[in-house]
Amino acid sequence: MRRQPAKPRATAAVDEVGLRLRAIAVTGAVSLAFLAVGAQLVRLAAVNSGVILQSNISEPVAQSFSRPDLVDRNGRLFATDVENPSLFADPAVIIDRDEVVEKLTKILPELNGRDLRRDLSDRSKRFVWIKRQIAPQLAQRIHDLGLPGLAFRTELKRAYPLARLAGHVLGAVNVDNRGVSGMERYLDDSASVEAVHGATLSERAPVRLSLDVGVQHSLVEELQDATKRYKAESATGVVMDVNTGEVLASASLPEPDPRLGSAADTQQTDRITGGTYELGSIFKVLTVAQSLDAGLSTLDTIYDVRQPLVEGRFTIKDLHPLGRPASVRDIFLHSSNVGAAMIALKSGGEQQKAFLGKLGLLDQGRTQAGPIAMPQVPKRWERIEQITIAYGHGLAVAPLQFAAAAAALVNGGELVKPTFLRGHGDGAKTRVVSAETSRQIGDLMRLNVTDPAGTGKRADVPGYRVGGKTGTAEMAAAGGYAKKSVISSFVAAFPMEKPQYVVMVMIFKPQGTDETRNEITAGHNAAPTAGRIIARVAPLLGVMPEPVQAASGATQATIATPN
Amino acid sequence: MRFITTTSIFLALSSAFLLYGLNYDTRQLEARVAQEELAVAKARSDIAVLKAERAYLTRPERIEPLARAQGLAAATDKQFARDIPMIVGSVSK
């Protein structure tokens, strides 16, 4: 109708077209804006499913500690942190207190209902721990109850996948994940434990212990076997690298369970580091070494051991008197108390004391896991002390310290410090005996195993060149010594042409059995135990067995046969 | 004059849209970062659990009987030849 506008109204028509265009432009712009807003709304509704909200849930502030892993010398895991739910309540939000108490005690029977009711009745509190570190399955069941006012917080919990293995060395942590003993305590002291909020796993590199999982396991198994076999009260053992002092395995039965936390701490003492013992005849290794090193005796020096030694009201006798004058070598092989006493008397008390002091046996030692038990040193050091200490009575030391001293005697004569960390045993060494003395002691120990008369012959392992010395010490009892209660011990080293490892075994209160022909001396129980341990751990430690000598003629013949 | 006004209106509008869009993109990115961080934390936690479980499964207490059942045992001197020529010789025969 308006297609043919009248000429006079031309300007008005132009205005009208302009207005229309403007109206369209404005409408377009506005609807475009609304469209953009709408699209953005759709996008927000569809894409973002509340992720932004999630991070705003406020967590109750509580500290936890993240710890680096503990691994063995080859990187196998001993201890690690895992996240674990802990249950807490907000009493102000709880609706039906009785229902909460009833249902929770059903799922967690170890909770005390009365205490729980009391804790939850204080509505001014906004945060009450109910149970920390519960199993994820139980946490799920509690979550499924759908009770208001109950919530979870993840915390770090120490996990020990190998259970009791090396429990004494590892130590334990408390519920806040702080170390309370052993190497766990060391982690706290060396500042590699961090305080964190919530459950943040540690990013620090794992701490590498000197222990070897395989060696430790073999040691524990053989010691358990020995306690059964010899009807003993307990057994302990330690395997040490003679050159670095690194402890590859250390066990004192029974091993504590680190998973029990602080409760495990006082459960069983570690006899390797926490107890001191009169070790008996294995001390003769030291007595002989001292005399050889001071040049007071050679292996062939003769001592008259026919008569018992009388000193004041004491008489020192041998269990099986030799009945003839004996060389130092014979005294060692037959483990003559009289002979050892005479060797010690020849050098005198001052020198004896100085020598033991040089080996660190008179002072308190320390490892990363804490102090070693203080040696019990006699107050006076008269002739009688010289005599008894010569064969290992009157001076009580921790087995770990003795093992370190034995390592020093066979490694070429340099002092080592026992350590539970890998790669910590290097550094400047102090010489305690000459290389020549060290070699002679090594030969004596080897001879004690190979010689048919030697007390250690049951410790031999074909191919692994074991050497060692036995010791049977009567246990101190009220008013003297108990004849039937002994600690039988064996200190061994292998391979003897260049010793790499020291193995020390102690069996507490062994009894005579058919297998030992009713004997309770170390040669019948501790020595074969040490042998079995070495047979199992030597391959793990990469010690090459030497094939038992084949007839050399045959070898020559095969060389000649090719072609 | 009119040109300047239109251009500036256009510029103002477009920059408003741009900012609006940028703002939301940033928030979205933040949300994604939070999400990824959560995933990382979850993965780390899973790794910790798996590590512990692997150590539990390879504990010597469990492996030993299995190995023994396979007929494996500690090496003894009997597994080692005295020297190489002996083996070479016996093989070449």
Image (spheres, grey):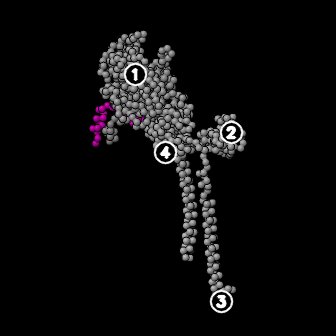
- Marks 4/2 in contact by CB < 8 Å: the verdict is no
What amino acid is labelled 4 in the image?
Glu
Q: Earlier in the sequence, mark 1 or mark 3?
A: 3
Q: Which residue is mark 3?
A: A8
> Crowding at label 4, few (<14), some or many (≥20) Cα neighbours within 10 Å?
few
Residue A556 within the magenta-colored segment of the rendering: yes
- Which is closer to the viewer, label 4 or label 2? 2
Q: Which residues are magenta?
A: A539-563
Residue A209 as seen in the image, left or right of residue A13:
left
Q: Secondary structure at mark 4?
A: loop
Rendered residue at 30%/35% (across/down):
A555
Rendered residue at 61%/72% (across/down):
A29
Q: Which residue is mark 1?
A: A283
From the viewer's perspective, is residue A157 above or below residue A274? below
Residue A265 visible to an observer of this rendering: yes
- Which is closer to the viewer, label 1 or label 3? 3
- Marks 2/3 in contact by CB < 8 Å: the verdict is no
Q: Secondary structure at mark 1?
A: helix
From the viewer's perspective, is residue A289 above or below residue A262? above
The residues bearing labels 3 and 4 have C-alpha atoms spaced at a distance of 88 Å
The residues bearing labels 2 and 3 have C-alpha atoms spaced at a distance of 92 Å
